[in-house]
């Protein structure tokens, strides 16, 4: 069974259209014509009005099985050239492998997989490449020849599925704090230590705390390019996916909430501990969190993925498709790391000997 798919084409030449945030509208990949959002959405009203609501509960078991198979199948027909093309199980927006038309797979966006919000891309491929080159500069532990021999094997713009949680929390933190005072009388040093039981409480409002909803994407990489600026958020429309890949989530909300709640708890605890001033040390002994008025939404957020290869090993580099924040994993020369460690040890030893010599002299 083939999945329903749609595409957005240029009204002038019928070539594929892509949403381009730099121009604030849609741009033709062939004649470079530019169209406003409202104009394209009106011309392609049939695409915008495709029903993406949850499945009808009155469907028979057989009909539900057919819908589930359609949503999980990996075959679609390109609306431009008619080719039947295989796609990944989680893909929601892809390019036809034959005519390269951006195609949106509506079955992957329906029911519980229908996003609530989307932040369109504001950065482009060129900026992703430039950011990667700048990122590697000044890294003294890179292996020799890295900048010359590292090969970029893939660059892709992907709308990553995210769960966003908002609400407020009442937080209480307890801790054991110490005040240490030392003084010397003649050759004798005295130490006075006072121990306190300290508590702080406060109410915090949190807005759209994110957690990526893809199992295959490393959570630490995604957190490294936060935050996203929600002033650019838009109500989801399939037209924004034109020209970019997109995935549906495979991390359920219940699982994502555990990670989000842990992030909220850590942030609240850090803020309350920061208020415990005037002590020599603070050791947290307990943290209680109560949530209220919480709301979760499903969104697609823009990320550039750049994969590069060095000495037959692949390394990832990611860039926030809205803000340009970036982060990557780089190879480390074991020889340079060893030499650097030896050099630091030698410098510390030399400094200690000099200080000792001055004191004894």
Image (tube, rainbow, N blue to C red):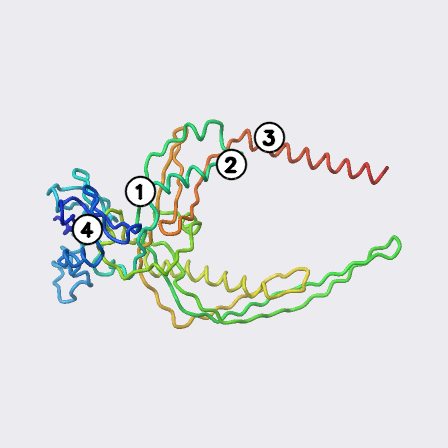
13 and 257: which is toward the camera: 13
Using the numbered discs, state the Cα–Cα distance from disc 1 to disc 4 in whole angstroms. 18 Å
Q: Which mark is residue 156?
A: 1
Using the numbered discs, state the Cα–Cα distance from disc 2 to disc 4 in whole angstroms. 42 Å
- Residue 108 in percent (x, y) is at 21, 53
219 and 34: which is toward the camera: 34
Dot 4, crowdedness within 10 Å: few (<14), some or many (≥20)? many
Q: Identify the residue at image location x=21%, y=61%.
A: 111
Q: Identify the mark nearer the N-term, 1 or 4.
A: 4
Disc 1 element: strand
Q: Identify the residue at image location x=36%, y=52%.
A: 322
Using the numbered discs, state the Cα–Cα distance from disc 1 to disc 3 in whole angstroms. 37 Å
Q: Identify the mark nearer the N-term, 4 or 3.
A: 4
| Location of mark 4 (residue) | 105
Using the numbered discs, state the Cα–Cα distance from disc 2 to disc 3 in whole angstroms. 15 Å
- Residue 171 in percent (x, y) is at 51, 69
18 and 227: which is toward the camera: 18
Outermost residue on the right side: it is: 186
Q: Identify the residue at image location x=44%, y=49%.
A: 224
Work out which quarter of the rendered image holds the C terminus and state it.
Answer: top right
Using the numbered discs, state the Cα–Cα distance from disc 4 to disc 3 in whole angstroms. 53 Å
Q: Identify the residue at image location x=41%, y=39%.
A: 132
Q: Identify the mark nearer the N-term, 2 or 4.
A: 4
| Location of mark 2 (residue) | 139
Q: Are marks 2 and 4 in contact (CB under 8 Å)?
A: no
Q: Closer to the camera: disc 2 or disc 4?
A: 2
Disc 4 element: strand
Relative to 57, say whether 118 is above or below.
above
Disc 2 element: loop
| Location of mark 3 (residue) | 339
Disc 3 element: helix
């Amino acid at each position: 069974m083939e999945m329903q798919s749609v595409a957005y084409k240029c009204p002038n030449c019928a070539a594929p259209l892509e949403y381009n945030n730099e121009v604030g509208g849609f741009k033709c990949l062939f004649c470079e014509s530019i169209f406003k959002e409202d104009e394209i959405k009106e011309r392609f009203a049939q695409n915008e009005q495709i029903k993406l609501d949850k499945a009808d509960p009155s469907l028979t078991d057989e009909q539900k099985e057919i819908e589930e198979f359609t949503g999980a199948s990996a075959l679609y027909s390109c609306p431009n050239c008619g080719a039947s093309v295989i796609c990944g199980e989680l893909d929601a927006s892809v390019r036809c492998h034959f005519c390269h038309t951006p195609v949106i797979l509506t079955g992957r966006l329906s029911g519980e997989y229908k996003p609530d919000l989307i932040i369109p891309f504001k950065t482009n491929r060129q900026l992703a490449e430039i950011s990667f080159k700048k990122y590697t500069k000044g890294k003294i532990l890179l292996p020799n020849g890295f900048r010359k021999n590292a090969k970029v094997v893939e660059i892709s713009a992907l709308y990553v599925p995210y769960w966003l949680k908002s609400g407020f929390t009442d937080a209480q933190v307890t801790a054991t704090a110490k005040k240490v005072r030392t003084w010397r009388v003649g050759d004798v040093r005295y130490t006075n230590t006072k121990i306190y039981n300290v508590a702080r409480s406060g109410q915090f409002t949190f807005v759209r705390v994110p957690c990526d909803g893809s199992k295959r994407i490393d959570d630490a990489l995604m957190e490294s390019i936060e935050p996203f600026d929600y002033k650019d958020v838009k109500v989801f429309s399939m037209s924004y996916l034109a020209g970019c890949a997109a995935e549906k989530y495979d991390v359920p909300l219940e699982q994502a909430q555990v990670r989000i709640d842990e992030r909220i708890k850590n942030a609240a605890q850090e803020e309350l501990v920061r208020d415990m001033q005037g002590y020599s040390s603070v050791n947290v002994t307990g943290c209680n969190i109560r949530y209220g008025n919480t709301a979760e939404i499903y969104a697609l957020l823009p990320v550039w993925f750049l994969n590069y290869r060095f000495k037959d090993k692949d390394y990832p580099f990611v860039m926030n498709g809205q803000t340009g924040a970036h982060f990557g994993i780089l190879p480390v020369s074991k020889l340079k790391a060893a030499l650097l460690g030896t050099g630091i040890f030698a410098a510390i030893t030399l400094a200690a000997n000099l200080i000792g010599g001055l004191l004894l002299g």
